[in-house]
Amino acid sequence: MLGAIIGDIVGSRFEFHNLKSKDFELFSPDCFFTDDSVMTLAIAQAILDTVKAHGTLEPDNAEHFYQQLASAAVKNMQAFGRSYPSCGYGARFAKWLDSSDPRPYQSYGNGAAMRVSPAGLAARTEAEAMRLAEAVTAVTHNHPEGIKGAQATAVAVFLLRRGVSKADVRERISCDFYPLDFTIDAIRPSYNFHVSCQSSVPQAIQCYLESQSFEDALRIAVSLGGDSDTIAAIAGSLAEADYGIPADIRTAALPYLDDKLCCVLDEWQEVMCR
């Protein structure tokens, strides 16, 4: 989850000023957290609230658990979004945040994938990763491509956290979600700004798959161009699950978050990682 947030912060200053290079300072005064970080932490809080209400991630009444999780996702995304109103939300999502009757709107935007890493981290089985991802996604992004983007990301995070190899993750994603029959070097010159899951999630996954380290994954993601903060957030969530986060990068990134956002990270560590 912090990997997604760091990717968001690193990519933030390049979203509308693409670099197409791996040669840049990771952090600068121009970096900031965006909606990617805010919504990732909102989903984390939703999972936390639901787990605490049931006392477990494996309740006897699973249907009730997932219904409550979906409600908690709506509640927390609206609360966090209203607390951080100027973080770059898309027009339809901004309208959803302010709605008194929020309903899904058939979105297949990559917001489904950039916020879903807590589902992959919380899951104890691949099936659970799929179901958690769908529950927190379908409240807004209920188009099949939106759900697919979220599930692909959550499953990849789950598998990598369990020590599954890159080769096997590539095969799993290629077989059941997206073809990964390209390289970043090949697509970089013509890759433009895309906000759909189908045009950014496989590219973000490929950024991770070609990387050699957590930092390298972020550099490759930024170098691709396009929706840089979201590409780097998705790649960063996978890279964290595989490589972990170097202490110096963690230390440099956390001051970009305020106390409220850091408290969610702390609570996650206390409740979900004990």
Image (tube, rainbow, N blue to C red):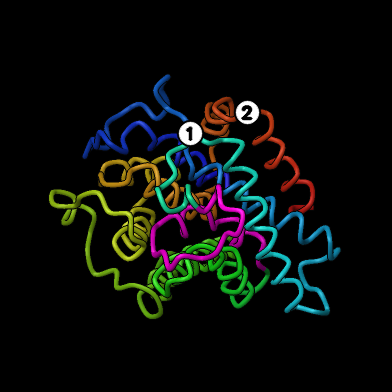
Q: Horizontal and vertical percent for residue 264?
A: 70, 42
Q: Circle 1 is placed at which residue position? A: 86
| Residue 232 drawn above or below residue 64 | above
Give the residues in magenta: 96-123
Q: Indicate the amino acid at tag 2.
A: Asp
Q: Nearer the viewer, residue 158 or 77?
A: 77
Q: Secondary structure at mark 2?
A: loop
Q: CA distance from mark 1 to mark 2?
A: 15 Å
Q: Is residue 119 magenta?
A: yes
| Residue 13 drawn above or below residue 220 | above
| Residue 255 appears left or right of 192 | right
| Residue 143 drawn above or below residue 216 | below
| Residue 177 appears left or right of 19 | right
Q: Badge 2: few (under 14), some or many (20 or more) residues near its Cα, within 10 Å?
A: few
Q: Nearer the viewer, mark 1 or mark 2?
A: 1
Residue occupying image coordinates x 20% and y 50%: 192
Q: Horizontal and vertical percent for residue 67?
A: 70, 71
Q: Horizontal and vertical percent for residue 260?
A: 68, 33
- What label sits on residue 258 in the rendered view? 2
